Image: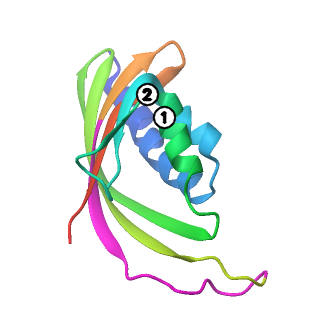
Amino acid sequence: MNEAFIRQACTDLIVRYAYLNDERRFDELAMLFTEDAVLYRPSAPEQGIAGRTAILEAFRKRPADTVTFHVTSDILVEVQDEESAQARSRILLLSATRAREAGALPSEQKPPVPGIFRDRFRLTPQGWQFAERRGMFWI
């Protein structure tokens, strides 16, 4: 078992999630999850979204004029065995309403919101994927 490889693969998932989320590449984002994964969004930490298809649909329902920027830090991955790992990480969410004019700054900027994610990963034939992603805002 190569623990360093597993830690890096899981760290890459966490970072990739932030980029794909902010770039609104939701089809690719959903593929980071196992078919039976559960996502708990920071905005609704007690309400699980079960299954890759449901996760994709939830992201597609986001308002088109919302822009986000997730800053991810302090990623700590703990390898459990050759096929499972868990992690925790911190996020800082910046969000606003997209500007109507190209190149203009977003309007209606919201205050930054700190939060955390607790993740469970599973090795699948497609590689490492989220089996569970549980987010919550801190303040």
Report the front residue among 48 and 139.
48
**What amino acid is found at the position of numbered circle 1 in the picture?**
Ala
Boundaries of the magenta span: 102-119
Q: Position of residue 117 (x, y in %)?
A: 29, 50
Is residue 127 shown to the viewer in this render? yes
Q: Quadrant of the C terminus?
A: bottom left
Q: Disc 2 on helix, strand or loop?
A: loop
C-alpha gap between disc 1 and disc 2: 5 Å
For mark 1, does the 10 Å Cα neighbourhood hold few (<14), some (14 to 19), or many (20 or more) residues? Answer: some
Q: Quadrant of the N terminus?
A: top left
**Pointers 1 and 2 in contact (C-beta within 8 Å):** yes
Q: Is residue 66 left or right of residue 93?
A: right
Q: Is residue 135 left or right of residue 108?
A: left
What residue do we see at 30% from left, 54% from top?
44
Q: Position of residue 120 (x, y in %)?
A: 29, 32
What residue do we see at 48% from left, 34% from top?
54
Q: Disc 1 on helix, strand or loop?
A: helix
